[in-house]
Image (spheres, rainbow, N blue to C red):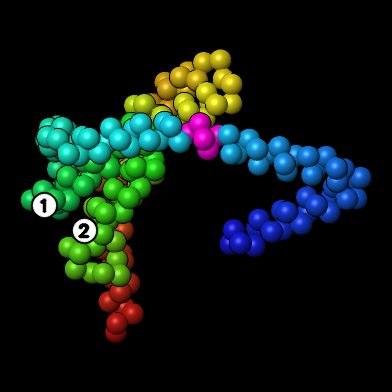
Amino acid sequence: MLNIVWPIFIIISFSYAIFMGNLEELNNSIFNSTNEAIELSINLLGTMCLWNGIMQIAKDTDLIEKLTKFLKPIIKFLFPDLKNNTKIQKEMSMNMIANILGLGNAATPLGLKAMESMQKENKEKDTLTNSMMMFIVINTASIQIIPTTVIAIRNSLGSENPTSIMFPVWIATIAAAIARNIHGKIFDKKDREKIKKHKRKIRK
């Protein structure tokens, strides 16, 4: 879909600039934007290297084990189907820790690894388990104590107080996670029963 939407936006922009006689301004904005994008990428690179390095150090020490134990009661409550699978619990813990630190780039491969492990345990390969759905939504809500990437972007763009975003981020991400968990506990079982009934009808 995006392969269609973005070309349309680009064509409309160029057509409008030509029609209004603003082609020179359009060219200037393109070059300025590319320069700003490169500067932003370089500024973010340092922050990403720092926190990814910290995560690698934590992975090679017993810190992850301690944090996994700390998150274990929460993971058991949210993912009762995985209470005996310590491997997946550890992968989930690392993903959650990366998200809490605002390291979306580090959290993504960790989340994919956890999903891959859950898929191996999934008996119905064409249907997501409750745990997989819950994990996806928790990642989407992405509870962040330190929104590292957002702070780095605000700092690179000259914000006077780049950390002022922290409190609103806490409220938004925690509220989103709580709302989804409540919904999940109430409706997931009903939804899965409907899916199973639908599959039975198709097979018949």
Front-lying residue, 45 or 88:
45
Say which quarter of the image contains residue 196.
bottom left
Q: Amino acid at mark 2?
A: Ser
Q: CA distance from mark 1 to mark 2?
A: 10 Å
Single out the residue that lies furthest toward the bottom. Answer: 204
Q: Are dots 1 and 2 in contact, CB under 8 Å?
A: yes
Residue 15, position as x, y percentages in the image: 84, 54
Residue 59, position as x, y percentages in the image: 20, 39
**Residue 173 numbered tag:** none
Residue 42, position as x, y percentages in the image: 51, 35
Magenta run includes residue 88 = no
According to the image, label 2 marks what residue?
117
**Above or below for 49 versus 12:** above
Q: Secondary structure at mark 2?
A: helix
Q: Amino acid at mark 1?
A: Asn
Instruction: Considering the whole magenta stretch, tell me its main secondary structure.
Output: helix
User: Which residue is found at the position 53% from the left and 38% from the top?
Assistant: 41
Report whether 46 appears left or right of 28. left
Can residue 167 be seen from the camera position used here? yes
Rate crowding at label 2 as few (under 14), some (14 to 19) or many (20 or more) other CA atoms within 10 Å.
some
According to the image, label 1 marks what residue?
85
Residue 171, position as x, y percentages in the image: 40, 26
Q: Specify the segment rendered in magenta.
A: 40-44
Rate crowding at label 1 as few (under 14), some (14 to 19) or many (20 or more) other CA atoms within 10 Å.
few
User: Which residue is found at the position 29% from the left and 84% from the top?
Assistant: 204
**Above or below for 37 versus 79:** above
Front-lying residue, 94 or 201:
94
Q: Say whether disc 1 or disc 2 marks the residue closer to the N-terminus.
A: 1
